[in-house]
Image (tube, rainbow, N blue to C red):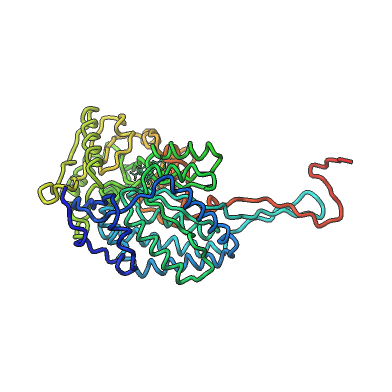
Amino acid sequence: MTQTTLNTVDITLFSALNVDKNIYQGGDQIVRSPIDGSTIGLVNYLPAADVAAVIDQSQAAFEQWRKIPAPRRGELVRILGEVLREHKEDLAQVVTLEAGKITQEALGEVQEMIDICDFAVGLSRQLYGLTIASERPGHHMRETWHPVGPVGIISAFNFPVAVWSWNAALALIAGNSIVWKPSEKTPLTAIACQALFEKAVARFGSDAPANLSSLIVGDRDAGEALVNDERVPLISATGSTRMGREVGKAVAARFGRSILELGGNNAMILTPSADLELATRAILFSAVGTAGQRCTTLRRLIVHKDVKAQVLEKLKKSYQTVSIGNPTENNLVGPLVDEASFNAMQDALAQAKEQGGEVFGGERQLADVYPDAYYVAPAIAEMPAQTDVVKHETFAPILYVLEYENFEDALRLNNEVPQGLSSCVFTTDVREAEIFQSAVGSDCGIANVNIGTSGAEIGGAFGGEKETGGGRESGSDAWKGYMRRQTNTINYSRELPLAQGIKFD
Ligand code: NAD
């Protein structure tokens, strides 16, 4: 492996925020950039045994923070949004360096953080409960929403900053403290977010208790310690289905709550009436964007037999001209995150061939320029049927193509995988569009018409069904997941009538 001397890595944001160099250059765990495999940081992992002390502090912060009125809590999140606007380019630079995202997508990820802050500020004045009619005279009922406690956030490498902000913004306005365990692959972006949060706190003033946000840079053991701690009532975990299976079980065993955002296997149904030009552009962004490393990446194209040849011809042309290379330069496809990811992709392509598929693309690129990084040509695999490999999420740019003849079959194929995150149909037939989004249509958490599977906006609730975990984050009423609901009955009469007309005297 090439060892770039650490001094050559200029992380503007860290200098701008005066982050102590020891935190990102003084440890014994190597952080590599997927761009060229070079060392860009040396961090220390917090031992799992020390996680309990972090939670002690977070619990103390929660006990203060829950007493601050929600609109004032919103003010902190408003300032966080302001700080993110000020440092948008610099934070995006760290995302590119550490996760390998092209600059445009890294900027988009930071914009998503800003958007959720704006959304949460508004919500901080709208944590509405209900008033409910009581059957008893001189009584009324209502529903109130309260903070839950320290919220544990576990995040994946591919959205190293946005996922934290989706959870953090809502948890904070809800009155909770937060404890974040980022991916081992992206500790620097997490250190950057923590520094930005501290800058926001300094501007906000003394209403914010110390340790309102805590960061645990650590490995899976540290994550497990967080998950198993009974003082953390809610764990919001984003990552693989394997991780979610373990985390979900552990949290349920102690009757905690979890929000699970796991793997996807997202499909597009492309019908004969569709605007094929539009569809091809949507396929390209959804299938090859972020080098196929989005949870919402388009992985399956279910295309009508009458337009299949035409669409594949267009697609293959686009795939051949798409620019692959250094994400800081003007390219559309950056690197895979690491060698393991490259090997998993090659393995999936070999399986696709064994299962009757015809593979286009998928080869390693730029190995001579970047021997320690893994760039690939995005692949298209024409499959005879929805075989085992197609049902599995391989976190790389592989688009499986399946043919259909009638719409019911297309729907069945869309739903016949274990995952249920995102889906879309391209059609100009209103019946197909409506059926796709109806109770008998797509079984996914996200079902779009005439837009691709990826690139969700923060205003809607985000999440998916089945092995995707069932959690919802971000917009709509996802905030309720970060609070506890209380039902209140108040008696303002001088009697004590019982409900259901029961007499007890
Ligand atoms: P991963 O599962 O390897 O790791 C995710 C996080 O979980 C890391 O922080 C890791 O340390 C932690 N972790 C792993 N096992 C754990 C355990 N037993 N207890 C506690 N923590 C544990 O995922 P990854 O490779 O970083 O990310 C890619 C995956 O994430 C893909 O499957 C992708 O679809 C999914 N993802 C889903 C969403 C979504 O919103 N649905 C968003 C982004 C990524």
Q: Is residue 466 above or below residue 488?
A: above
Say left or right for 149 vs 346.
right
Say left or right for 494 vs 167.
right
Say left or right for 84 vs 99.
right
In depth, the one of 108 and 23 nearer the eye is 23
For the question of whether residue 289 can be seen, the reply is no
Extreme-left residue of the structure = 368
Extreme-right residue of the structure = 505
**Residue at point 30%, 29% (across, down):** 387
**Residue at point 50%, 55% (across, down):** 58
Q: Quadrant of the C terminus?
A: top right
In depth, the one of 303 and 239 nearer the eye is 239
Question: How far across and down, in percent of the image, does residue 249 sit?
Answer: 48, 36
Question: How far across and down, in percent of the image, does residue 402 sit?
Answer: 29, 35
Q: Quadrant of ligand 1?
A: top left
Question: How far across and down, in percent of the image, does residue 134 sit?
Answer: 75, 51
In depth, the one of 427 and 13 nearer the eye is 13
For the question of whether residue 178 can be seen, the reply is yes
Specify the quadrant of the image occupied by residue 338. Answer: top left
Question: How far across and down, in percent of the image, does residue 370 sit?
Answer: 14, 50
* Count of residue discs: 0
**Residue at point 27%, 37% (across, down):** 401
**Residue at point 38%, 42% (across, down):** 220
